[in-house]
Image (tube, rainbow, N blue to C red):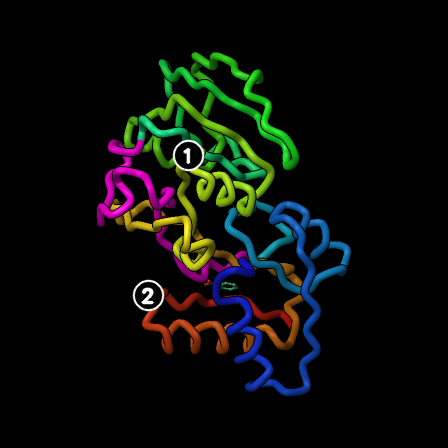
Amino acid sequence: MLYGLLPEIIATLKQFSPDIDVNLKDISSYQQIDALKSGEIDIGFGRFAHQDPWIQQILLRHERYVVALPKSHPLANVRKQRLIDLANNRLILYHQTHLPVSSTVTIETATQANDKLSTSRVNRAATHEAASSEPITEPLLHLFAQYGISPFMTTTVSDLQVALGLVAAGEGITLVPASLQTVRTEQISYQRLVHENVTSPIYLHTLEDFVHPKIPDLLTAIYHVYEQRGITYRQQNFVSQA
Ligand code: BEZ
C-alpha cells in the first residue's frame, strides 16, 4: 500500500484535520485483524477481504494489475497484453498470504513447476509437480486460472520488492497493482492488460462496533485524492457507532 497513494492520502488527511496524530505500522492484512481487535491499530488497509463479525470492511476501489517485464523481453513494448501470451514465461509470485479457500478456482489438470526462493538465495531444486484438484489460493495464479491458464514455471519469493528485483534481473515476469509501476523503471517495463477485471481490491478495515471518530475525515481525504487524480471509485456507506 505504501507505494501508491498512502503518503498523499495521509498528507491530505493532515490538511483536513491538522490535530490528527498518525502512526503507521507495516503489518500484513491478516495480522491487522488481530491488531484491530487488540486496539493496537484503529484502521487497516489491505487487499484481502475478511469475513469476521467484529470487523467492518469498506471497499475503497479496484486497482488494475499491470504486467512487469524485463526491458529486454520481446513483449516489453507491447501495449495491452493478454494473460495467455504471458503463460510461457516464468511467473514470479510474491504473496505471503493466500486467498481464503472459499474464493478460489479449482483446476483439475494444472501442472506447476514451483521454484522456492528465499530472500537470500535461489533454490531451483525445490521443483514439484502439483497435478491436482486443489483450489488455487495464490492470488496471481488465481487470476490466470480465471482465464483457464496455468503458468507452468513459477518462482515464489518473500515479497514484492524481491519479485521486482528478479524481473529487473531478467529472471521472469510478474503482475503488480498499477501503483507499483514507478519502481525500477530503468530495468522494468510495465504494460497494461487487456482484461479489465484483472484487478486488486483495496479495503479499509475497522472494528464493527467502535469506529474511530476520525474515520469520516479519512474517507473524505481518500475520496478527495481519488477525485484529484481522476480515479474511479464507488463511495461506500459505513456504519458509525461512535
Ligand atoms: C489506494 O491506492 O487507493 C489507497 C492506498 C492506500 C490507502 C488507501 C487507499
In reply to whether residue 61 is colored magenta, the answer given is yes
Mark 1 element type: loop
Q: Nearer the viewer, residue 242 or 235?
A: 235
The kind of residue tagged 2 is Thr
Q: Position of residue 156 (x, y in %)?
A: 53, 31
Q: Quadrant of residue 150?
A: top left
Question: Circle 2 is placed at which residue position?
Answer: 232
Give the quarter of the figure containing the C terminus.
bottom right
Mark 2 vs mark 1, CA separation in Å: 31 Å
Question: Which residue lies at the image location 36% right of the left edge and 65% below the top edge?
Answer: 233
In reply to whether residue 168 is colored magenta, the answer given is no
Q: Nearer the viewer, residue 159 or 165?
A: 165
Closer to the observer: label 2 or label 1?
Answer: 1
Q: Is residue 139 left or right of residue 18?
A: left
Q: Is residue 162 left or right of residue 78?
A: right
The kind of residue tagged 1 is Gly
Mark toward the start of the polypeptide (2 vs 1) = 1
Question: Which residue lies at the image location 36% right of the left edge and 42% below the top edge?
Answer: 69
State the extent of the magenta-drawn residues as a range: 57-86
Question: Which residue lies at the image location 40% right of the left edge and 71% below the top edge?
Answer: 226
Question: Which residue lies at the image location 70% right of the left edge and 69% below the top edge?
Answer: 23
Dot 2, crowdedness within 10 Å: few (<14), some or many (≥20)? Answer: few
Q: Position of residue 30 (x, y in %)?
A: 63, 45
Q: Quadrant of residue 117?
A: top right
Q: Position of residue 155 (x, y in %)?
A: 50, 29
The answer to whether the beta carbon of the residue marked 1 is less than 8 Å from any atom of ligand 1 is: no
Question: Circle 1 is placed at which residue position?
Answer: 172
